[in-house]
Image: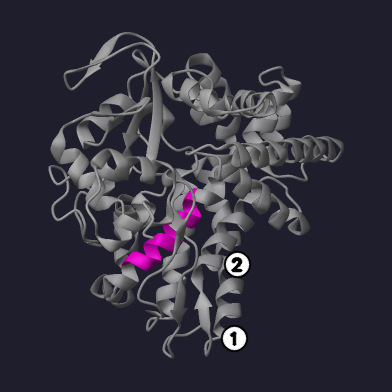
Amino acid sequence: MRGNSAASDMKLGVETSLECRLQLFLSGDPIAISDPYPLYHELREQGPTYRCGPLVLVPRYEDVKAIATDATRFSSDYSRKGTRAAAVRARLISDRERQAYDEVMAFESNFLNRSDGDHHTRLRGAAHRAFTPRRIAELKRSVIAYCDRLIAALDARRDEIIDMAQFAYELPLQVICDMLGVPLSDRFQILRWGNALVSNRDGIDGRALLAAHEAWLAFDDYIRQLIAEHRRAPGAGGPFVAAMLEATEGGVLDKDEVAAEFVMMLLGGHETTSNLIGTGLLGLLKQRDQWQELVGDQSLIPTAIEELLRFVTPSQLGSRRAIVRTEIAGLEIEPEQTVVTIRGAANRDPDIFDDPDRIDVRRENARHHLALGFGPHYCLGASLARLEADVTFRALTTAFPDMQLAVEEVSWTGPASLRRVASLPVSLGFGGNV
């Protein structure tokens, strides 16, 4: 008997409603997240806003940009309050799940990207010291060294089919762990905790929530011990650790805020860059002429990074909570309404970007993308992400100019907001130098 799964219908090409397909996408269904761009185009064409359950979705570039800069009408504190939080909490079936949800959301409310006003200013000011232009320039040598070691390991396996998704994960993880003073032996435990937390990001169900809660408790305990160790050995953890310790001792941040900053940096510092590298590489290998452009002229790589940020949009969705009665493009918005800005759709808006579904490593307005946010919440680690991507694509196009995809289709994983390739099998070819 044929099942009634909408995901199966999508795979078979059977027509399903826009609402149903949006729900599948937002829940992180692997088929739905594999290629959301036709859905985005349909959503953008039907109007500037779309009500989807407890959410108002906003897919057009100018509206997404305007909401990102508006701190008068919208708040970034959406984890604990608003229509989406209320709907998620109402779905939870036990007191244990509701308690877990409340505790995880209270912790995440101290993330930089979930804060507003003076709270955001304090958090951002404390962390900024680790991301000054001088510090990023100092990091370049270690990023190159890490990349060179990973490239050499790949070259030793040149005759094999290589999963480049693992490469895309390892480099950013090593860099951010160094910045935070995390021992090498602990890095993959950090990755496991991070995956549990990230899997709870969009379509929360009880099992994912309880796993995230368990990971959060372990992660939080680990970070507090790490901070205590760095306090006993000042200077051992680098500028970010020093900045956090100084902030606590000076009364700028409390211990909960510092722990949240560490967790956010460990997650945000590698998840989005990993997505940029892995999914960006997939895009270039599928649009082979653009890969060849970079192989032939590496001076194009800085512009190509901006274009890949636009094309990939490593963090697809942004959430805000209305704090006053307002409107978006004529739609009345009540206080507490959760508004989801679809950055992935905004960055493919044909009113802004010509031929938006194609990578163009020479695109003149590529830097106008919204992949790294906009306004007061512009990504703190943007310069580090650009540095890592630049070093990576220079190294890959030099060492493996003949790299090719080894499969017709790749598999996808993650929540909708952080969709990424689960594996990226390639053959490395025989040209290039290491």
Q: Can residue 244 be found in the magenta stretch? A: no
Residue at (16, 43) in percent of width and height? 352
- Return the mark for residue 156: 1
Dot 1, how many residues are within 10 Å of its Cα: few (below 14), some (14-19), or many (20+)?
A: few
Taking the view exactly as shown, the residue that stands out farthest to the top is: 325
Left or right: 328 as drawn, with respect to 163: left
Q: Front-most of 281 and 405?
A: 405
Lower sequence index among marks 2 and 1: 2
Residue at (20, 49) in percent of width and height? 365
- Return the mark for residue 395: none
Report the magenta residues as a range.
272-283
Q: Is residue 177 visible?
A: yes
Left or right: 254 as drawn, with respect to 370: right
Q: Is residue 77 visible?
A: no
Task: Please give the residue where the numbered disc 2 appears in the rendered image.
Answer: 145
Q: Amino acid at mark 2?
A: Ala
Q: Front-most of 146 and 19?
A: 19
Q: Front-most of 69 and 315?
A: 315
Q: Quadrant of residue 251?
A: top right
